[in-house]
Amino acid sequence: MATVIDKAKREGLEARDAQRARSSRRYLGLLTGAAVVTFLLIVGIIGTILIKGLPSINWAFLSDLPREGMTAGGIWPMIRGSLLLMFGTMLVVLPVGVLGGIYMAEYAGESRFVGLIRSSLVSLAATPSIVYGLFGLAVFVLAWKLGTSLMAGWLTLALFSLPVVIITTESAIRAVPESLVEGGLALGLSKGQTIRKIVLPNAASGIATGIVLSTGRAAGEAPPILLTAGIYYSTGQLEMNLETLRKPVANLPYHLAEGYRQGGVIPESIIWGTCVVLMGLVLLINLGAILVRARSRARSLQS
Amino acid sequence: MNNGTPLEDYVISARNLRAFYGNQEALKGVGCQVAGRRVTSLIGPSGCGKSTFLRCLNRMNDRIPGFRIDGDLRIMGADPYAKGADLMKLRRQVGMVFQKPNPFPMTIFENVAIGPKLHYGLKGSELEGVVEEALKEAALWGEVRDVLTKSGLSLSGGQQQRLCIARMLAVRPEVLLMDEPCSALDPISTAKIEELIVALKERHTLLVVTHNLQQAERISDYTAFFMFGELVEYGQSTQLFGSPVKSETQDYVSGRFG
Ligand SMILES: Nc1ncnc2c1ncn2[C@@H]1O[C@H](COP(=O)(O)OP(=O)(O)OP(=O)(O)O)[C@@H](O)[C@H]1O
Ligand SMILES: [Mg+2]
């Protein structure tokens, strides 16, 4: 009797196992397909840019000024402008974003209102950059009378990066082990001392990664700059002084957008070359962020 | 016991101490007086409130939302929960070591120096002196004197725990709270910490939570047996382990449950 039941049971189980194996094969197939499509897309995009753009890359292209109404020469002013935009944005974002993240993680608590702020941050992080561009245009350029300028660009790009920086700072702080926080408090350190001496050093690499990645991304965005800081061609703008802050600045995304719009006038080689440079810049920034993270991880595990 | 003695004569006195996590009552009216410069063990089955009691003493549970206490508690004569009580001062007087060693990810020297530096503004050779003294007191100096600039995380588990003890001692606390300080350690490291605990009572009042009954018997002058949030029996360790008064204690120390 028992063996009969066992047999029936076993057959049932085998059927079920076979069913499960079939469905996991199906899913595996789907996942592999999705991965292959993604991979091909990325390779396709990067490959196209590299094939078309790499031939124009040489030292002169990177370090020269544009010549003959932008139809020849290099793109140094645009590279410099993008770097200027990025570092300035970082300067603005660093204090505001980090303090905001500390506040959200350690002081805000869990009220309804804080929940609302938190979901607003998430929505803002997903808001298209053109919206920030329009906001920057209305507030910084017009209302604050900064004009189309480097400074307006910094503020706009800073706003654009801020939600991500606050969110990543908050999560880096929350990721610091509770046992370390308790260790600090048990020594009689105040909350502020514990945050400064124990929490922040442990969250630093996560915070830095968030800042670098988000400002790096901001530096590649055309729409906010288009409306607040961009200028297509700038001769004699290479000297740096306080006036630079009030003047518009040439930069890579803008150059691309304009260059493409004026289709035909600008040689394609320059546009593709600019593309490669912009991509390379963003890649370098991300690589930097990865290195920062890896190094501090190695340090915290060091012997 | 000792009902006629005023609370202030003991380093720690609790009367009808109750603690709640939200609606759950974790301590149901605990009363005891802890003698100074002695080792007191806290034993009892898991979840009986040993850690809760310990963490009331340095207000570590303040951070837990919904936690509150009720009753009377005195530490060196003062009510740590009184309005306006100085929380940082309390924690300087009442140090704590945790179950899992938690050295800060900084150098060995910095781990020990952080307390005296921030609290007393010590620098230079004065600070170095305090660090050395604390490391000696924690029986770690000989092992780390040449590697003070290495990360605290590079030490073995037992060394890390002694580093945490040194870090606590450098702040010059009177009371030392240890919540299962050996349960993450190997037997040799455990023996070292036990030796250290006994040596430390010369200048400190120690409360040690442990699940190891032999350990409690070896190291402590007094033992408190907790069960279901109540202090079932409290007295000299020889008495409590040798001839317990309550049948629950008898059952627990003879290993019949727990
Ligand atoms: N953070 C918390 N939130 C809610 N309840 C808690 C919390 N910490 C402890 N408790 C509860 O309080 C009671 C006492 O817990 P406590 O940690 O003091 O026990 P313990 O004697 O230290 O146990 P163990 O030997 O397992 O460490 C338990 O019922 C536990 O579930
Ligand atoms: Mg416990």
Image (cartoon, coloured by chain):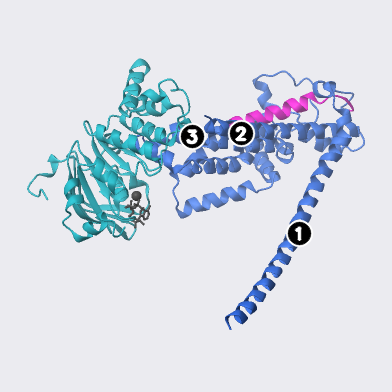
Chain colours: A blue, B cyan
> Which corner quadrant of the image does residue B87 belong to?
top left
Q: Is residue A111 above or below residue A70?
A: below
Q: CA distance from mark 2 to mark 3?
A: 17 Å
Cβ atoms at labels 3 and 1 below 8 Å apart: no
Q: Is disc 3 in the same subunit as disc 1?
A: yes
Main SS of residues in magenta = helix
Residue in the picture at 22% in, 60% down = B248
Give percent across and percent down for residue A248: 72, 29
Chain under label 1?
Answer: A
Q: CA distance from mark 3 to mark 1?
A: 42 Å
Nearer-the-camera pick, B16 or B170: B170
Read off the residue under disc 2: A294
Residue A188 visible in the snapshot:
no
Read off the residue under disc 1: A30
Chain under label 2?
Answer: A
Give percent across and percent down for residue A280: 76, 32
Indicate the amino acid at tag 3. Leu
Q: Secondary structure at mark 2?
A: helix
Nearer-the-camera pick, B134 or B190: B190
Read off the residue under disc 3: A200
- Upstream in the sequence, badge 3 or badge 1? 1
Magenta region: A71-92
Question: For this view, does B39 lie left or right of residue A276?
Answer: left
Tag 2: Cα neighbours inside 10 Å, few (<14), some, or many (≥20)? Answer: few
- Upstream in the sequence, badge 2 or badge 3? 3
Q: Is residue B113 above or below residue B57?
A: above
Question: For this view, does B14 lie left or right of residue B181?
Answer: left
Nearer-the-camera pick, A254 or B47: B47
Chain under label 3?
Answer: A
Indicate the amino acid at tag 2. Ala
Q: Is residue A98 above or below residue B18?
A: above
